[in-house]
Image: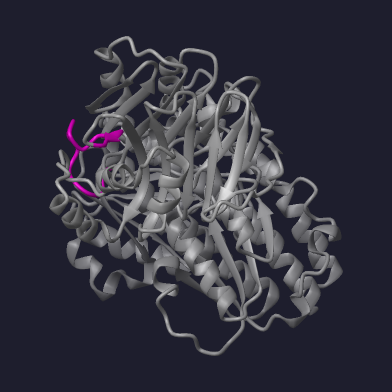
Amino acid sequence: MCGIVGYAGRKRAAPILIESLRRLEYRGYDSAGVATVSDRLELHKSQGMIKDLERDIPELGGTMGISHTRWATHGPPSNENAHPHTDCKGKLALVHNGIIENFQELKEDLEEKGHKFLSETDTEVIAHLLESNYQGDLEKAVRTTVKQLVGSFALGIIHADHPGTVIGVRNESPLIVGIGVNENFIASDVPAILAHTNQIKYLDNGEIVIMDAGSVRITDFEGEIKEHEIKEIEWSLEDAEKGGYEHFMIKEIFDQSKSVHEALRGRFADDFFAGFPAALIQSVKIIACGTSYHAGMVGRYIIEQLGQIPAQVDMASEYRYSNSTGQRPLVIVITQSGETADTLAAAREAKRRGCYTVAITNVVGSSITREVDRTFYIRAGPEISVCATKSFTGQVVALYIIGMYIGKALGTLTPENHQKLESGLRTLPRLVDGVLRDTEPIKKAAEILKDKESVFFIGRNINFPSALEGALKLKEISYIHAEGFPAGELKHGPLALLTPQTPVVAIVSKDHTYDKVIGNIREVSARSAPVIAIANSTDGEIEKFADVVLRFPDTPAIYSPVPVAVVLQLLAYYTACARSCPIDKPRNLAKSVTVE
């Protein structure tokens, strides 16, 4: 969604705001804007990316201000719809991430009172509502205003009559506070302000922060003071930079041998699971969205194999509106950012139904951690590219470890098998390295795909989700239509779409499904569709059936989704490069979906 940065300090605000905003461009990039206060309110905004804003921005004065990069919801990208928005008097400026559900009725009432609207956004309603409620006390006006809003919102607010003061508000949409020396910040996400501070306070829902250069005060909507512990972020600024790579995505793909190791490090000790009610678990429900949903699907196979209990995977946007069956499964919610709106709502619904909840996330202190009973941090470091890579493999690693613990607690895993699985998991960084050491065959395969209009991905059992994830990666960054299928389902409809111009990427693992997948490849070849197989390095038969073979290091099938994922990520990346696509910021997409 949209990205917000606010600054109150003693340095010139505009350069800091723009530099920080650039680190949030993955959250939105159809327009951007900056507002500062010196002796008056100054504002500049424009349609397009941040570089377009910088090209013709005037010299903005002031040592406090707010900035915004937009991902459109209400109103198309335009200069008028870009944030910040102002009141009629040009005294107040405001930036917003979220959706105001009752904006139309509020707008009609404000128009009757004489307010003039310049944009199509829901956000502008907040600016005029603040103006209507303002009687000289900005903080009081903010408290009155937020109680009139229905929906999700993170806000940054400044006023010309209150120089030095920046106010932030959080309700559902994420907002953090950065504590510096003679300067303080608000932001939508940590990378925005890492160049200035790693001391962070996470706002909770229904909280307001009032800050200037030397102080930070956090209250609830009623004005009661709220104390927050400072969290020290372990990520470095270098972690959030490209480090010499052309794109964040390829950097993050190559980060995976390290990030997988970090996800595993120290996780086999029993202390992590102290108090975990695994012995009472009769079933598991995994809830997630997008790439995290595909990781959850892999997790279903892992948990059913290791724990021998039923596991089910639900999309978060569906679960929250589903009927309760009266069952009380262990609920695992997965979200990279910890701020995904549908997943947060699903976690709350699971708690309401009386379920024990576990979150798998990447961001310490994120909202999901305050909604669940237990949190598993994947420790992947910042993931900037919209296209998720290392978070996926980290989430799968987390599900291996949780599945192993459930199996051990339920007695379905013998100590010997548990040790064998643990040893196998420790080889995952090496398996990832094995793929990354030789990417040339994958680059060549991308040349086959670059001019195609449609690509199918097929897999079976634990690699059926891999097929779905591979299709998602290709479609979101190369703009090629791609679909993933269980290989056995081709004959139930999709075969009708195969032509010599429809490549099929087949994931082939040496397991009990091997012969069946080979049969499915034969069906594809009979329709003259080219086949790109992803297979174990020791598979000596696959060349007989596939036109191109991409290899991953030999490993038991249960571990194969991790190296297979890396192959599929690279295939999507190099295809998008060949098509000159904007890889880190694909059209119409944003990194963290914080609204429904």
Range of residues picked out in magenta: 72-87
**Left or right of 321 in this view: 565:** right
In this rendering, is residue 243 above or below 351?
Answer: above
In this rendering, is residue 120 above or below 595?
Answer: above
Please name the residue shown 77% across and 70% down the image.
276
Pick the front one: 436 or 218:
218
The number of numbered badges drawn on the structure is: 0
Say if residue 559 shows up in the picture. no
| 216 magenta-colored | no
Q: Identify the image quadrant of the C terminus.
A: bottom left
Pick the front one: 538 or 165:
165
| 81 magenta-colored | yes
| Residue 312 in the image, given as x and y percentages of width and height | 52, 76
Q: Based on the displayed image, in which of its 4 quarters is residue 484 positioned?
A: bottom left
**Left or right of 131 in this view: 260:** right
| Residue 292 in the image, given as x and y percentages of width and height | 49, 56
Please name the residue shown 24% across and 13% down the image.
56
Q: Identify the image quadrant of the N terminus.
A: top left
Say if residue 413 shows up in the picture. yes
Prevailing SS of the magenta stretch: loop
Q: Based on the displayed image, in which of its 4 quarters is residue 348 positioned?
A: bottom right
Pick the front one: 388 or 202:
202
| Residue 355 in the image, given as x and y percentages of width and height | 62, 78
In this rendering, is residue 247 above or below 134?
Answer: above
Residue sticking out furthest to the front = 135
| Residue 413 in the image, given as x and y percentages of width and height | 78, 73
Please name the residue shown 30% across and 33% down the image.
84
Rendered image coloring scheme: one colour
Q: Based on the displayed image, in which of its 4 quarters is residue 236 positioned?
A: top right
